[in-house]
Amino acid sequence: MRFVIIGADAAGMSAASRARRNRKDLEIVVLERTRDVSYSACGMPYNLADPEREIDDLVVREAAVFREKQHIDLRLGHRAEAVDRSARVVRGTRADGKPFEVGYDKLLIATGASPVILDVPGADLSGVTGLKSLEDGRRIKRYMAANNVRQAVIAGMGYIGMEMAEAFFERGVRVDMVKPRPRLLPWMPDDLSDVILEELETHLVRVHTGEALQSIERTGERLAVACTNIRLETDLVLFAAGVRPNSELAAQAGLDLGPDNAIAVDRAGRTSDPDVYATGDCADAFHVVTGERT
């Protein structure tokens, strides 16, 4: 049986490894559009806090280990673009521009999510970014080194925003955080949220609630961020306003979607097609392939 996995981040490679441990006879093919696999995405803010540390230190296991020790057919630079469920085939394009086609018996879609980039003028400027992939981390680190970043605006006040505010502080970067809603952390009790606000302000992080980011423009070597009532001069803008599921492949294949366009699955991770499974950013393989229940 051939088990094909689309996506080689934590969830995809965890599934591949678990499947190999439990099914020695299984043919496992993993398709990954980038050159990065099996890295600690949660560690990126802490890595970015240290200008001397290589971003590739976050790689947990090199691609060669999966290929040579676990006999997993890991194909980097393979962008999956369509799933033909009737033919049981994944089609796409390699990094060299040539098309490819891979048949499957069971398929796991492990394409994760992408950061929400606000649809505002200037969102595509150099120095404006999200943080989700290892390449995002590389880009931020290169930009900070090349542009002597001393001020940053973070659009969003969730977990990534808080961690990056800390990382920027460690680098001596002054931070402004903006969000359109009136409360810092609305899911927390007020007294806990107030403690975090006090801690942020103690570390010279300026918090601007009730300020929707409206546009970004280049002003010489810097950026100008226009919000509802304020205008901020900065060197870098980080979007940290959540993520969107990368569910386009599933939607094009006619699989059912759930809330926020996430791929709808049952408790076994099975989609509306019994031979197609899906997982988020951090999950293991499924009992249908591995013989174990998660």
Image (cartoon, grey):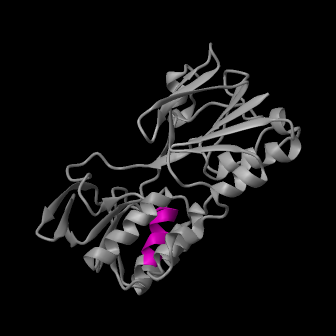
**From the viewer's perspective, is residue 278 above or below residue 61?**
above
- The residue positioned 73% from the left and 38% from the top of the image is 28
Which percent across, then down, holds residue 5? 65, 37
Identity of the residue furthest to the left in this view: 220
Residue 286 forms part of the magenta stretch: no
**From the viewer's perspective, is residue 187 above or below residue 12?**
below
Residue 164 forms part of the magenta stretch: yes
Q: Nearer the viewer, residue 137 or 185?
A: 137
Count of marks placed on residues: 0
Which percent across, then down, holds residue 12? 66, 45
- The residue positioned 85% from the left and 41% from the top of the image is 293
Identify the magenta region. Answer: 158-167
Identity of the residue furthest to the top in this view: 86
In the rendered view of the protein, which quadrant contains the N terminus?
top right
Choose top left, top right, bottom left or bottom right for residue 279: top right
In the rendered view of the protein, which quadrant contains the C terminus?
top right
**From the viewer's perspective, is residue 253 above or below residue 44?**
above
Taking the image as shown, residue 96 lies to the left or right of residue 149, namely right
Which percent across, then down, holds residue 7? 59, 43
Specify whether residue 281 is in view.
yes
Taking the image as shown, residue 164 lies to the left or right of residue 146, namely right
Q: Main secondary structure of the magenta part?
A: helix
Q: Nearer the viewer, residue 91 or 271?
A: 91
Taking the image as shown, residue 45 lies to the left or right of residue 209, namely right
